[in-house]
Image (cartoon, rainbow, N blue to C red):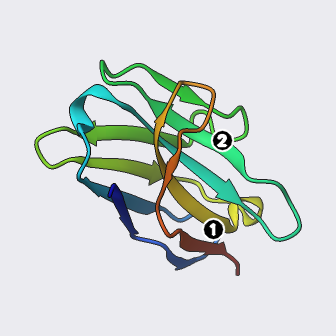
Amino acid sequence: QVQLVESGGGLVQPGESLRLSCTASRIFFSIITMGWYRQAPGKQRELVATITSDGRTNYADSVKDRFTISRDNTKKTVYLEMNSLKAEDTAVYYCNAGGTSSTMGNYWGQGTQVTVSS
């Protein structure tokens, strides 16, 4: 069974940075698209960023120029570097595997909470 384990969430102040990590197992990591999605209270889950097997990235307009997605195929890990965090970035962030640049795949991590508050 595919496993995705996220880490790196927490409480930060506006303007600060965080890096999320997601390590995959039982999956052909190097050939699949990985993504990060988020869900805020009372809102639908939304795409944050995706990265294909050949490194092409896609970002939500709200995070462009602030967030960077990357992957290390040797470690089967995908990262989300989040800079200049805003209160509206507060959400549970989920790692996703097996989708496309713009659609979610079938595999999800357990989620990690990111809270941006002063």
* Residue at 23%, 52% in the rendered image: 26
Q: Identify the residue position indicated by label 1 in the image.
A: 92
SS class of the residue under badge 2? strand
Q: Identify the residue position indicated by label 2 in the image.
A: 47
Q: Is residue 90 above or below residue 24?
A: below
Q: Can you say which quadrant of the picture contains the C terminus?
A: bottom right
Q: Is residue 15 above or below residue 115?
A: above
Q: Is residue 77 above or below residue 42?
A: above
Q: Which kind of residue does numbered mark 2 sit on?
A: Leu
- For residue 41, which numbered disc appears in the image? none
Residue 37 location, x and y as percent?
A: 60, 50
* Residue at 58%, 54% in the rendered image: 84
SS class of the residue under badge 1? strand
- The quadrant holding residue 92 is bottom right
Gap in angstroms between the C-alphas marked 2 and 1: 12 Å
Residue 55 location, x and y as percent?
A: 33, 22
- In the image, 66 versus 80, the foreground residue is 80
Q: Is residue 70 above or below residue 9?
A: above
Residue 43 location, x and y as percent?
A: 86, 60
Question: Residue extending furthest left?
Answer: 74
